[in-house]
Image: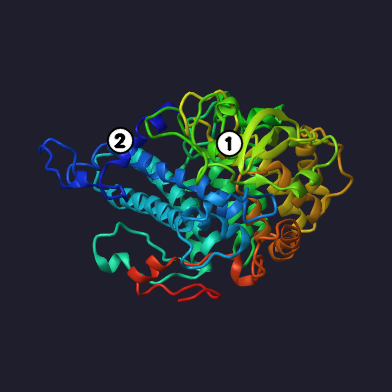
């Protein structure tokens, strides 16, 4: 894990970078690394891979708005001071987003394509390198997996997108029409299948390095087979069964999955790597999820101004809290209550409380917040070192149960469903159904940015979110009448105006402006 993190910053500054800086105007000594002298050695390609991995870090923060808050799991705390540019973050959760919404949607789109560009450069330059055939196979497998992962993120959020499979060396290469969703899924499956054939390694010891493994590749291919327009459940089943025969296992304690002391542990299949500190490799997710708070040093160990754009996002809904079964140990591991007082809109924290059976004392105020990634005291304001889970063994077991239910083999699904429930302290179920598997996935993977895409994949998004919208409008009179108009077109996002302006070949998704 230290290796994968240690070179991320170095790699991000290479020619692979998708960002611009005044530094590029400076003249460097001829001994410096350039695109002409790079991509030669195994170390060069390892650094380049780290640059591609680095783009995974664009996903968790943007996913707050586009995944978790887009679902019935979470909302946000309305704050009058956010009526400026931060107001755009409130549009996606209410299905008011469009081609002009801005930062989160465009940041995710551009960040993911930067990852694809870095993977493409690696793949195109690999043959001419000094690497041995075995080294080339290892690098190629990893780069193909990352490209497939990034395209899966794109297709599940935008549908058909421009399919870029080579390093961009001209304007003609850069501005292409979007491919169909079917074509994108075909490419995802082709890439990840080749990565598996090339021998992407099985996780053998824990903690892992943080790099992609055969387990992650099998889960990704299973998700693709279960999400594409023409579903292939039998193929997904085989991949997920293969994962159960690898070396993964459930942690005994659900909370241990998220402990900073247990990164890349036995339940982790693939997670985004972060380090605490001021080196630019940190995660700020916890600071976004805690309440906007005037004395957050009592909550976090170090004070930071988190009014404005930082705090009060991805707040668990009351309905989400009420949906946990009695005795579900995941509730207190996932959600906490910050109790305090209000002075206008200024919240002053006093104590932490459990959400189960919480009763608000007279004269007090409270805020729910996500507890999974909350591990104080922190040393650096607005920075934590918590990793973010992408694929977990608990989620893979439930995805397998879902896959089996879809094929009508519910008796075979039951042991996988009940294994996850047992760890959560819940009694075994007598049967597996589409609904109880979906409910289990909701609580097992809560606040891990899966709920929205799971609702879309299982065909529940329109019905569930329409009802959720009715509840939210009854609670908050400021929500506009046009909010939560959840239609088939709204199951994917709009291409932002900037993308349409710079790429004349890109056609807007149906239901949005041009």
For mark 2, does the 10 Å Cα neighbourhood hold few (<14), some (14 to 19), or many (20 or more) residues? few
Indicate left or right for 163 with 450 as reference.
left
Image location (x, y in percent) of residue 233: 67, 58
Q: Which residue is at the far front?
A: 343
For mark 1, does the 10 Å Cα neighbourhood hold few (<14), some (14 to 19), or many (20 or more) residues? many
Instruction: Give the labeled residue for mark 1.
Output: 293
Choose between 144 and 14: the one closer to the eye: 14
Mark 1: secondary structure: loop
Alpha carbon distance from label 1 to label 2: 35 Å
Quadrant of the rendered structure where residue 459 is? bottom right
Tell me, yes or no, if residue 152 can be seen here.
Answer: no
Among the two numbered marks 1 and 2 on one chain, the one whose residue lies closer to the N terminus: 2
Choose between 478 and 20: the one closer to the eye: 478
Mark 2: secondary structure: helix
How did the renderer colour the structure? rainbow
Image location (x, y in percent) of residue 503: 35, 70
Indicate left or right for 75 with 206 as reference.
right
| Placement of 218 over or under 3, stated as above or below | below
Instruction: Give the labeled residue for mark 2.
Output: 10
Nearer the observer: mark 1 or 2; the answer is: 1
Image location (x, y in percent) of residue 43: 29, 34
Q: Quadrant of the C terminus?
A: bottom left
Residue plotted at (43% across, 70% down): 178
């Amino acid at each position: 894990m230290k290796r994968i993190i240690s070179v991320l910053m170095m790699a991000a500054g290479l020619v692979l970078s998708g960002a611009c800086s005044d530094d590029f105007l400076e003249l460097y000594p001829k001994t410096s690394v350039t695109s002409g002298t790079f991509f030669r050695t195994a170390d060069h390609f390892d650094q380049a891979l780290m640059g591609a991995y680095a783009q995974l870090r664009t996903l968790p923060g943007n996913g707050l708005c586009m995944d978790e808050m887009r679902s019935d799991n979470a909302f946000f705390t309305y704050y009058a001071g956010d009526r400026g540019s931060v107001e755009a973050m409130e549009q996606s959760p209410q299905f008011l987003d469009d081609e002009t919404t801005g930062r989160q949607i465009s940041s995710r789109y551009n960040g993911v394509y930067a990852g694809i560009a870095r993977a493409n450069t690696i793949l195109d330059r690999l043959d001419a390198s000094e690497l041995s055939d075995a080294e080339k196979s290892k690098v190629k497998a990893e780069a193909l997996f990352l490209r497939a992962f990034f395209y899966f993120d794109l297709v599940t959020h935008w549908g058909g997108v421009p399919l870029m499979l080579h390093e961009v060396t001209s304007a003609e290469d850069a501005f292409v029409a979007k491919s169909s969703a079917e074509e994108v899924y075909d490419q995802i499956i082709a890439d990840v299948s080749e990565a598996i054939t090339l021998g992407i390694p099985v996780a053998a010891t824990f903690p892992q390095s943080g790099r992609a493994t055969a387990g992650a590749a099998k889960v990704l291919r299973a998700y693709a087979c279960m999400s594409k327009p023409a579903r292939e459940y039998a193929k997904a089943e085989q991949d997920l069964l293969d994962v159960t025969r690898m070396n993964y296992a459930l942690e005994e304690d659900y909370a241990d999955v998220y402990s900073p002391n247990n990164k890349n542990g036995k339940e982790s299949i693939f997670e985004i790597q972060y380090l605490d500190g001021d080196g630019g490799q940190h995660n700020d997710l916890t600071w976004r999820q805690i309440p906007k708070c005037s004395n957050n040093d009592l909550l976090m160990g170090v004070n930071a101004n988190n009014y404005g754009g930082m705090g009060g996002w991805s707040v668990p809904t009351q309905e989400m809290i009420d949906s946990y079964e009695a005795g579900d140990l995941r509730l207190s591991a996932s959600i906490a209550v910050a109790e305090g007082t209000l002075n206008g809109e200024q919240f002053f924290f006093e104590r932490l409380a459990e959400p189960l059976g919480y009763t608000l004392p007279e004269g007090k105020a409270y805020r729910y917040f996500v507890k999974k990634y909350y591990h104080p005291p922190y040393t650096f304001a607005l920075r934590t070192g918590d990793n973010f889970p992408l694929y977990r063994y608990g989620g893979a077991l439930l995805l397998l149960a879902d896959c089996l239910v879809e094929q009508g083999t519910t008796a075979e699904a039951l042991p996988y469903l009940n294994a996850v429930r047992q760890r959560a302290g819940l009694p075994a179920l007598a049967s597996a159904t589409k609904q109880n598997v979906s409910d289990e996935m909701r609580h097992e993977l809560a606040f891990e940015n899966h709920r929205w895409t799971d609702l879309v994949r299982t065909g529940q998004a329109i019905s569930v979110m329409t009802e959720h919208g009715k509840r939210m409008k009854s609670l908050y009179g400021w929500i506009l009448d046009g909010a939560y108009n959840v239609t088939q077109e709204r199951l994917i996002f709009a291409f932002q105006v900037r993308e349409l302006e710079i790429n004349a070949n890109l056609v807007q998704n149906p239901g949005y402006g041009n």
